[in-house]
Amino acid sequence: MKKTAYTMRDVASRAGVSLATVSHVLNKTRYTAPETVERVLGAAKELNYYKNVHARRLAMGRSDLFGLLISEIANPYFSDIITGFQTSAWEHGFDVLLCNTEYDPGRTQTVIQKLLESNVRDVAVLTSSIEGVATAELTAAGIGLVFNNSGTVQTLVSSLRIDYLKGISQAIDYIVGLGHKKVAVIAGPQSNRTAIILRDALLSGLKARRLRPFPVLETDFRVDSGASAVREILAQPDTPSVVFCGNDLIAMGAMSALEEAGVEVPEDVSVIGFDDIFFASLARPPLTTIHIPRAQLGVLAFEALNTMLNRKLRRGAEYSVETKLVVRRSTAAPTKKRILRPGFNRVAR
């Protein structure tokens, strides 16, 4: 007589807890009350769950894993995305294989192979450092993908679209309303697709309002890169009254370098970031930034994959999220105060 292959849902039912609780206990990913842990482990033992999982994976040719592919774990931009995606997966009885590329093409290929070897169900590619051609092996193996701001919707491919323009337009209207006329831009790297989208949208919006940003610099999405870029800005003959930054880490580095140079934020120069990471509200001064609902993005990414997985023809779909301006204390109306820059005399705004 063939034995029943029990699932995580069966364990949850036997223990009288949620799927998420079973996942947390089995994977040791969150503190759970000792008595609950005992019930879950007891139920798993009674149902011989661990052995059944292994047998089921071999029989189905697919694991209970969904892949999540990001650029770098150290970047706080991804923390809420990971939380949203992982929580949604756990609630549906799945686990997550988290991989990061570190913007390295060689590592990217290794990660793709790891996902294939792990027989993941589907993969959320939430990094702009990977193009569709690099993930062709995954779709060729029947693995569905959801991309962020890339990829044409088709069989096995869904797309998440972030409406950057809404938040950017709000930010530009805001600084124009404050009276700013001299604008500098520190964009992300030219090699990053999202950085290019943000830069072009910002420059187009400024031009539409008859503002000509100078200088327009490109740098990495890192704190020290933002600091270096601001030093280059301060070396220019004319100083902007507001600096737009390609992400919050750049903005924090920019504010740090301005402080070191004796330039006050926002009294002398206003600074605007992008992403609204957790640390943006803790910066000194708290950072005005454009908010991306990253937890929602993670949830949508899983929903896109799970929906596509359950469609007969595995056809993808498009999903979207909006951005919005969050005003804090790093921005204010421009003043006529003169700023001293290294190697230059004080110049009036």
Image: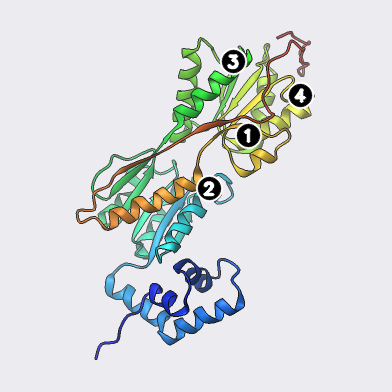
Q: Residues within 10 Å of mark 4 (few under 14, many from 20)?
A: some
Proximity of marks 4 and 1: CB atoms separated by less than 8 Å: no
Picture quarter with the C terminus:
top right
Q: Relative to the observer, which residue lies in front, 319 or 33?
A: 33
Circle 1 sits in a helix, a strand or a loop, which is it?
helix
How far apart marks 2 and 4 lie (CA) works out to 30 Å
Image coloring type: rainbow
Q: Is residue 264 visible?
A: yes
The residue that disc 4 covers is: 264
Task: State the mark number for residue 343.
Answer: none
To which quarter of the image does residue 251 belong?
A: top right
Which residue, as the protein is rendered here, is positioned at the far front? Answer: 16
Proximity of marks 2 and 4: CB atoms separated by less than 8 Å: no
**Which sits earlier in the primary sequence, circle 4 or circle 1?**
1
**Which sits earlier in the primary sequence, circle 1 or circle 3?**
3
Q: Residue at point 58% right, 46% down?
A: 75
Q: Relative to the observer, which residue lies in front, 238 or 342?
A: 238
Q: Residue at point 48% right, 69% down?
A: 23
Task: State the mark number for residue 225.
Answer: 1
Circle 4 sits in a helix, a strand or a loop, which is it?
loop
Q: Amino acid at mark 2?
A: Phe
**Which sits earlier in the primary sequence, circle 2 or circle 3?**
2
Q: Is residue 54 above or below residue 190?
A: below
Q: Amino acid at mark 4?
A: Glu
How far apart marks 4 and 3 lie (CA) works out to 21 Å
The residue that disc 2 covers is: 78
Q: Residues within 10 Å of mark 2 (few under 14, many from 20)?
A: some
**Which sits earlier in the primary sequence, circle 4 or circle 3?**
3
**Which sits earlier in the primary sequence, circle 2 or circle 1?**
2
The residue that disc 3 covers is: 177
How far apart marks 2 and 1 lie (CA) works out to 19 Å
Expressed as whole percent of the image width and height from the top left, the position of residue 162 reads 42, 36
